Amino acid sequence: MSQRPRPRVIAEIGCNHKGDMSIARDLIESAARFAKADFVKFQKRCNHELLTPEEYNAPHPNPVHSYGDTYGAHREFLEFDVEQHRRLQRWCEEFGIGYSTSVWDMTSAQEMAALNPPMLKVPSACNLHFDMLDLLAREYEGEIHLSLGMTTPDEQESIVSLFERLGVQNRVVLYACTSGYPVPFDQVCLLEVARLRELYAHRVQDIGFSGHHLGIAVDIAALTLGANWVERHFTLDRTWKGTDHSASLEPDGLRKLVRDLRAVASALTAKPTDILDIEAPQRAKLKRLPGVHLR
């Protein structure tokens, strides 16, 4: 049995930069140089397009974590423009890590596709925005990663079928995901990884896992169930203001996740021979054989 592919780890910075480019740069550097992750990921929204006027002008549902007087103002405070994303992309190149972002609306999808990163992500909240999926399929040449949190099986099938009709299924990665911050262990539902592999591994490029739980044990289990991509939120300080920090890994947690995923992936093989090379001298020295040592 051949060794499985090395798992890819995405450090989801999202909005954990608090609207500060210097913090964003520090997060990129830490994910790349200290944790050795494969990608960092940000988020891109055109808030007036994404939100209804009522949503934009409503108070933040969790005011202690708000960066503005309304939810729209909060989102605008945390938003980076296209030129700032170009700078983030350059910093990723400088530090030797892949750049990506989630896109939440048509404008953001067009703007980020123009940067031509190796992958773009569709969040669970927007995975039924079929016009946006169509745009990404037709106008973007990289991988399309898509989370399936809060999405019914019928909706999942409609998403995959759309990509198949558009002929881009071979560059689609689907993620098992429970949408919550943080998610209790009994609601992670890890067997969704195995279900997605059974249903879709032969129809799309790959299967991943996007986690919002605490710790890293669950991610290791996701790998053993068939997730070749693992995405976790990433922050420099879990106590910072913002709703995502509490469900994020700090630098040492991300480093340990990358280390342990790669170690376990290396171990997930069957024996290529009856007796391994490492076992042969131990067998000669220690093995009690019938007719030789046993009478």
Image: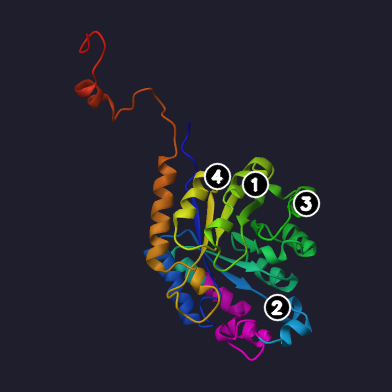
- Residue located at (57% from left, 51% from top): 190
The quadrant in which the C terminus is found is top left
Q: Which residue is mark 3?
A: 154
Q: Earlier in the sequence, mark 4 or mark 1?
A: 1
Inter-mark Cα distance, 4 to 1: 9 Å
Magenta residues, start to end: 60-89
Element type where label 4 sits in the image:
loop
Q: Which residue is mark 4?
A: 226
Element type where label 2 sits in the image:
loop
Q: Residues within 10 Å of mark 3 (few under 14, many from 20)?
A: few
Q: Residue furthest bottom?
A: 69
- On the image, which quarter does residue 294 sit in? top left
Q: Is residue 227 above or below residue 213?
A: above
**Residue 65 appears left or right of 141:** left
Q: Which residue is mark 2?
A: 46
Inter-mark Cα distance, 4 to 2: 34 Å
Q: Position of residue 166 (x, y in %)?
A: 78, 51
